[in-house]
Image (cartoon, grey):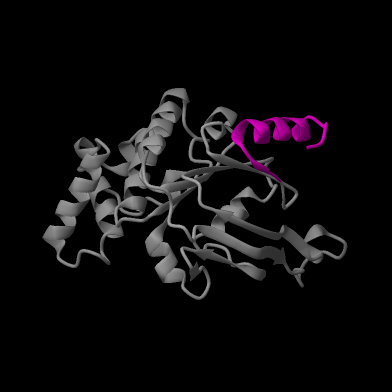
């Protein structure tokens, strides 16, 4: 078993996200009203694998984006290993990698090895050392054969794996993944799940794949911006099924 996450963990301290009214919105529309995307929540995530499940628009992505500072809490705070995600955002992002649903949303360079190199610019100043580190990172995932390929010529599964290498290349300790298998076929979904299982990092991921969620040590169920269940995977999935099918948690 890999080492657990540091004892401080990922901590939400009455963290909430509220969107203020849009002054240019049509009166009476949803945009003209203050909207609570995530109600205040307090929890500490130390488990090796944490899944977040819930309906589209429930607040899963907002919850995840708070962890590395992609979103800021309107109230309360979020800390990662004791670092505040607003005040210490750059230090947090050196510890937390974020994997998007669509890998093309984060693959910036046209050639695979160049994209991984881009992630290493802060830690490897010399170009030759950076190239070597990028090739070694790809090799750790068995992707060295893709180094000279265009990211646009890769399959969906290959793109997601290359994005994962880029996200973790600089030694991040926590991986946050927002529905990473949504755009993948069955074979590539299974491959990504095997890769996730072997990662030494703490992994916190949102998913609609309940089999994938069942592999987590802890599962959060999010509904209408609230964490309505927090516990062991099977119990959480059962609670979500009841909620989704109209039976309540």
- Image coordinates for residue 82, horizontal then vertical, percent: 48, 67
| 248 is within the stretch colored magenta | yes
| 141 is within the stretch colored magenta | no
Up/down of 57 relative to 213, above or below: below
- Image coordinates for residue 202, horizontal then vertical, percent: 44, 48
Q: Residue at x 43, y 32 (%)?
A: 193
Q: Quadrant of the N terminus?
A: top left
In this image, 117 relative to 160: left or right? left
Q: Provide the residue span drawn in magenta.
A: 229-249
128 or 194, which is in the foreground?
Answer: 194
- Image coordinates for residue 150, horizontal then vertical, percent: 27, 42
Q: Quadrant of the C terminus?
A: top right
- Image coordinates for residue 81, horizontal then vertical, percent: 46, 63
In this image, 231 relative to 127: left or right? right
Q: Residue at x 68, y 59 (%)?
A: 41
Image quadrant where residue 55 sits: top right
Image quadrant where residue 71 sits: bottom right
In this image, 86 relative to 96: left or right? right
Q: Residue at x 63, y 30 (%)?
A: 234
Asked whether the viewer can see residue 128, the reply is yes
Up/down of 98 relative to 236, above or below: below
Q: Residue furthest left?
A: 128
In this image, 2 relative to 144: left or right? right
38 or 186, which is in the foreground?
Answer: 38
Up/down of 69 relative to 205, above or below: below
């Amino acid at each position: 078993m890999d080492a657990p996450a540091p004892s401080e963990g990922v901590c939400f301290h009455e963290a909430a996200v509220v969107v203020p009214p849009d002054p240019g919105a049509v009166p009476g529309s949803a945009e003209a009203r203050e909207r609570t995307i995530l109600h205040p929540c307090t929890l500490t995530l130390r488990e090796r694998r944490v899944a977040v499940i819930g309906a589209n628009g429930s607040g899963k992505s907002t919850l995840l984006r708070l962890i590395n500072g992609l979103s800021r809490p309107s109230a309360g705070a979020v800390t990662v290993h004791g670092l505040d995600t607003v005040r210490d955002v750059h230090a947090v992002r050196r510890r937390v990698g974020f994997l998007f649903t669509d890998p093309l949303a984060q693959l910036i360079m046209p050639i695979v090895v160049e994209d991984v190199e881009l992630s290493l610019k802060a830690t490897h100043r010399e170009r030759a050392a950076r190239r070597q580190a990028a090739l070694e990172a790809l090799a750790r995932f068995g992707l060295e054969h893709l180094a000279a390929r265009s990211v646009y010529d890769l399959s969906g599964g290959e793109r997601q794996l290359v994005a994962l290498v880029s996200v973790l290349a600089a030694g991040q300790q926590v991986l946050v993944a927002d529905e990473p298998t949504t755009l993948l076929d069955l074979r590539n979904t299974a491959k990504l799940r095997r890769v996730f299982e072997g990662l030494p990092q703490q992994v916190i991921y949102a998913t609609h794949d309940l089999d994938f969620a069942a592999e987590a040590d802890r599962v959060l169920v999010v509904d209408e911006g609230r964490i309505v269940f927090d516990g062991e995977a099977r119990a959480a999935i059962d609670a979500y099924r009841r909620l989704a099918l109209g039976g309540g948690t």
